């Protein structure tokens, strides 16, 4: 079904059943608009570490030769970089060659969001009362927004008093993004039918997915809200407005539903590789739901971190866009950089764990890697990637491996990780 056009003005729908009036909202539920937390309140970031210490040539010839032997005749389709905690590049195969990273792109969007928003940040869905007596529902893309929260909003909208002369009639605006912004332009149209390719909207019940993607999220939301109002004896005059139109300065906050805290959101994006959450974090971190502007801001932030940026292209927040380009050396440097960050622990804790959790829960079980690899996986047709932190007896190793066309990439990645675990190849990280 084609998406319902989202007018920049109003699209009125009057649906519902008359019913008994409900009690007025308690004054305790009404607060003045809260001021956003200033970024200056976050701890200062340390000076860049990633690029200056990553050398142009590998410093561990034994590990380098081992990795080259593992990829053998497929070297042209692989990029592999390994760094130690001092920023020394232990091994590097095509580390500066840009590749399609698949979901390793999420390491970028989650690092950026954590730095910009902090570990206690929550996405808010808010109900506002406007000076003409109408209400407006706004959102920030909470991936866990569901029917119980929607029913609370319906109840509180009715309790706010309804329209003059019609206490059971609620005039409610839903602030949403235009349809052309629901999917990054580079997403394959076929992916948009699946749950993993669901549209990115601000008011997204169950992340705009059921068993497959919800093709028209505002239409679904309008239907469910009207149903919730009718169940409570009211009726709704519901309209869609552009989320990019500013909220009036005199709007009063009636109620808000916060999301899970940032560490849950990060884990959903990195451990479970949830595309919707990664896209929302990129936009919220940038302070803009204009994807082009958000990409510019994250690229600018990455450039300020001292990372090797040659060939890097940020197209989306999740990695589903095949025009993303990252290098394995960039990813190893990003991991090293985030290890020096004030929120390093939260970033590392957001990743899948070999043999234990997330997309790595069923691999490397019974090997020395089990429980010691914290990483983000990536999978697209013809693409396999893994980037993360491998805890060795000689300290952490920052590893990134990207295959764009390898024959048995999962097997090769496992063999590479086993060699990185062998610290006798690089005693003390040196040749």
Image (cartoon, rainbow, N blue to C red):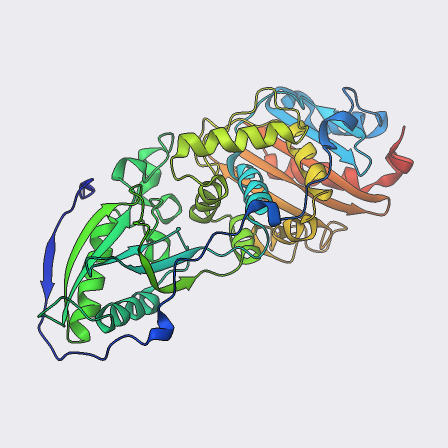
Q: Is residue 210 visible?
A: no
Q: Nearer the viewer, residue 31 or 80?
A: 31
Q: Nearer the viewer, residue 217 or 170?
A: 170
Q: Nearer the viewer, residue 287 or 144?
A: 287
Q: Is residue 79 visible?
A: yes
Image quarter in which the N terminus is found: top left
Image quarter in which the C terminus is found: top right
In the figure, 334 relative to 216: above or below?
A: above
Q: Residue at x 77, y 40 (%)?
A: 397
In the figure, 264 relative to 55: above or below?
A: below
Q: Nearer the viewer, residue 160 or 311?
A: 160
Image quadrant where residue 378 sits: top right
Residue 63 falls left or right of residue 401:
right
Residue 341: % across, % down? 70, 44
Q: Residue at x 53, y 40 (%)?
A: 109
In the figure, 389 relative to 52: above or below?
A: below
Residue 179: % across, % down? 26, 39
Residue 268 falls left or right of residue 5:
right
């Amino acid at each position: 079904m084609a998406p319902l056009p989202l007018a920049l003005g109003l699209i009125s729908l009057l649906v519902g059943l008359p019913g008994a009036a409900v009690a007025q909202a308690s004054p305790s539920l009404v607060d003045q608009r809260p001021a956003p937390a200033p970024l200056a309140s976050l701890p200062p970031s340390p000076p860049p570490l990633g690029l200056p210490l990553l050398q142009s040539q590998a410093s561990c010839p034994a590990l380098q030769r081992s990795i080259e032997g593992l990829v053998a005749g497929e070297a042209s389709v692989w990029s592999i970089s390994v760094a130690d905690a001092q920023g020394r590049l232990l091994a590097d195969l095509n580390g500066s060659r840009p590749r399609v990273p698949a979901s390793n792109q999420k390491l970028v969007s989650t690092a950026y969001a954590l730095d910009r928003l902090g570990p206690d940040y929550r996405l808010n869905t808010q109900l506002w009362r406007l000076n003409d007596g109408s209400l407006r529902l706004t959102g920030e893309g909470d991936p866990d927004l569901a029917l119980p929260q929607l029913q609370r909003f319906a109840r509180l909208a009715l309790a706010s008093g309804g329209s003059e002369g019609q206490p059971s009639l609620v005039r409610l605006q839903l602030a949403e993004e235009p349809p052309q912004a629901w999917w990054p332009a580079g997403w394959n149209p076929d992916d948009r039918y699946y749950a993993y390719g669901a549209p990115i909207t601000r008011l997204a019940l169950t992340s705009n997915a059921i068993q497959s993607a919800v093709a028209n999220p505002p239409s679904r939301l309008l239907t469910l809200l009207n149903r919730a109002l009718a169940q409570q004896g009211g009726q709704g005059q519901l309209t869609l407005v552009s989320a990019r139109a500013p909220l009036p300065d005199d709007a009063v906050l009636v109620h808000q539903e916060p999301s899970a805290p940032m560490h849950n959101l990060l884990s959903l994006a990195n451990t479970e590789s949830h595309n919707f959450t990664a896209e929302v974090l990129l936009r919220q971190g940038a302070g803009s739901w204009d994807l082009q502007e958000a990409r510019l801001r994250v690229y600018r932030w990455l450039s300020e971190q001292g990372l090797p940026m040659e060939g890097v292209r940020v197209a989306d927040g999740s990695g589903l866009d095949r025009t993303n380009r990252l290098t394995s050396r960039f990813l190893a440097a990003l991991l090293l950089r985030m290890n020096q960050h004030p929120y390093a622990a939260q970033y590392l804790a957001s990743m899948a764990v070999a043999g234990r959790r997330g997309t790595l829960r069923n691999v490397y079980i019974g090997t020395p890697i089990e429980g010691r690899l914290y990483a983000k996986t990536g999978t697209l047709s013809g693409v396999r990637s893994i980037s993360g932190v491998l805890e060795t007896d000689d300290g952490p190793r920052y590893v990134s491996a990207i295959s764009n066309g390898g024959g048995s990439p999962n097997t090769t990645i496992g063999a590479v990780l086993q060699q990185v675990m062998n610290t006798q190849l690089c005693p003390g990280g040196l040749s």
